[in-house]
Structures are given as structure tokens and as C-alpha cells.
Image (tube, helix red, strand yellow):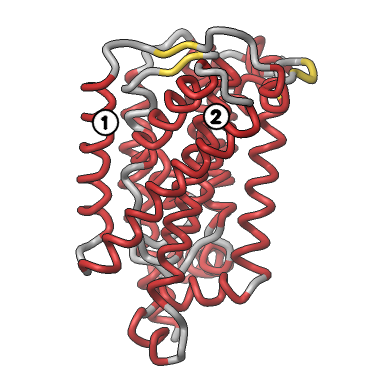
Amino acid sequence: MGAETQTANFDRVTAPIIEYLIKYPVLVAILTWLGVTGIFVVLNPSVMTQANIWGNIFRQTALIGPVAIMVAVLMIGGDFDMTVGANYAMSAMAFILIINQGIPPVVAILMTLALGGMVGLLNGAMVTATGIHSFIITLGGWFSIRGALLLLFSGSARLESDVALMQIFSYEFGAGFEALVLWMFLVLLGALYLVHRTSYGNHLYAVGSDKDAARARGIRVTRTRIIAFTLTGMAASFAGLMHVARFGSARPVLQTELPLVAIAAAVLGGCALFGGRGSPNAGFFGALTFGTFGAGLVAAGASSSWYQFFVGIVLVGAVVFNRYVDRLRQEKR
């Protein structure tokens, strides 16, 4: 009887928490971020309480944040894009080559964004035309782009002169906070508006939940998916531009882990692996969690290999938790 009472009391305590997590799955990412932050503050309070470290955290987050945000949008529609890391590197190197040829910076930026968008458009067209899962198609694209970069370039590419226009990304406000952080938030606001305030967002959720049902309702499923892929490709190239603004150089092997980090960030924030649920906030808070963990490792003097370990643990743990939440949601219906 005592055990039954304890179980009942436990259920009464946890039920409201589970209800909140079902309704607001992004809370998992926020709580994870707070937990990671708390651990490193305890381990190294003298460093983690300084403004400079937080400027560095948000700066690092901003370099992957736009990609994680748009990968979350893509996952709402039930698709993946494994080419984002290779697209990031390709766009960064392409921009440097274009600028070094004397092309005006505005034109170079537009050409780079168009290149990233074309990669996304091609991914979407191939996925919808063949019916093959997007993970397989874009994984093949990842190998193709990365291999081409390695064949074409033996080393890194570097800007031959300063580009004043790139100050719109790299301008520092103080304490390590740079303009690229503001650009990341602009991408987030744009994605939130697109997903939650437009008919396209409603269509995306419908496509992710059930493509056949969405098509029966008159939703143009193919177009909806291709748009999401194109925007994701442009986000990867945009992040590549910010990388060049920050470092002035790029390498063919840049951001090798980005596809898995972006997917892990989105899943951590509550995006379902098979679509129909999630928010751009998921990608942002997931990316912020990984950015905080990476900076915390540096502050603690720990090996960077722990970062990969953390990404793997978070990805598996988030998937298991999301399946648990899905089961509870089904039981409540």
C-alpha cells in the first residue's frame, strides 16, 4: 500500500511537468542549456561569469545558429539536409574566390546566397522526384560536394584584402558580442514568422504530419518541401558568409559535423524526427546549448573530443525522450 501511495504521489508531481513538456517541448532544450551552463559555472565560476565568455558563446552559436534554425524548419516538414556542412564550406570558399576576382561585395554576397539556394533546390527536386528519403539523397550530396572541394582545393582560401561591407557581420559591440549575433536573431525571427504566421507554415506542418492527407486537402506538397530545402541551403551559405566575415578564410573540411549538430539541436528542442512537430526555437536553443558546451570545455581546459561525445549523447537522449512524449501524447488522445 505504501508503494502504491508513493507511486500516486510521484504521478501527481510529475504529471503537470509532463503536460508542460508535451505542450512546450522546447523547454527540454532550455532546461538542458541551463543545466550545462550551471555545470560549467560551478566548475569554473571566474571564467563563466565574465561578459567576454558569453560574447564568445553567442558568437560561436551564431556561426551555426542560422543552419540549426532552418534545419528545424525543414524537419517540421519531415525532411533532413545532410549537405548543410558541405554547403557551408563551399559557400564560404566560393565567396572568397569571387571577391578575390574583384567582383563587388554586394554582388558576391548575392551570388553566394544563390549558390547555397541552388544546392537546396537541387536537393528538394531530387528528393521529391525520386521519392527516396531525404537523408539518403542529401547524404550523397554531402559526399559529392565535400569530395569536389577536396579535389579542387589543396588548402584554405583567404581574402586577399579587407572587405568593408563584411563589417555588417563582424562589427564588434564590445565584450566579444559581434553583429553576426544580431543576424542570427533576425534569421530566427524570420523563421518564426514564416512557420507560425503564414499559410506556408500551416502547410509545412500538414506535410510533415501526413503528406497524403495534406495533398488531399489541396496543399502543394512538392512545392512546400522544395521551398524548405531551398531556404535551408540559403541558411547554410549565409552562415558560411558570416564565417568568412569572422575569420577571413575557409577550408574544404569546414563544419564537417554541422549536419549532425544541427539535427541534434533541432531534436533537442522538440522537433520530431519524422515531421509534423517542432519550432525554429528548437534549432536556436539547441545550438545555444552546444555553443555553451563548447565554450565551457575551453574554459575548463578539457579536451574538445568531449564535444562530439556530448552531441552524440544529446541526440540519442533527445530522440528517446521525444518518443516517450509521443507515446504519452497518443495515450492522452
Q: Amino acid at mark 1?
A: Arg
Is 251 on the left-hand or right-hand side of 137?
A: right
> As displayed, is residue 280 above or below residue 141?
below
Q: Amino acid at mark 2?
A: Leu
Mark yes or no: residue 30 visible. yes
Q: Which mark is residue 3?
A: none
For label 1, the residue is: 146
Cα gap from disc 1 to disc 2, whole angstroms = 18 Å
For label 2, the residue is: 241
Is 52 on the left-hand or right-hand side of 219?
A: right
The residue at 29%/17% (across/down) is 153
Image quarter hosting the N terminus: bottom left
The residue at 32%/54% (across/down) is 123
The residue closer to the viewer here, 205 or 242, is 242
Quarter location, residue 152: top left
Per the image, label 1 sits on a secondary structure element best described as: helix
Q: Could you say where residue 159 lies in the image, as x and y percent from the top left?
A: 52, 12
Quarter location, residue 6: bottom left
Q: Could you say where residue 148 lies in the image, as x and y percent from the top left?
A: 24, 29
Q: Residues within 10 Å of mark 1 (few under 14, many from 20)?
A: many
The residue at 48%/33% (across/down) is 290
Residue lying farthest front? 102
> As displayed, is residue 2 above or below residue 63?
below
The residue closer to the viewer here, 108 or 20, is 108
The residue closer to the viewer here, 174 or 5, is 174
Dot 1 or dot 2: first in sequence order is 1
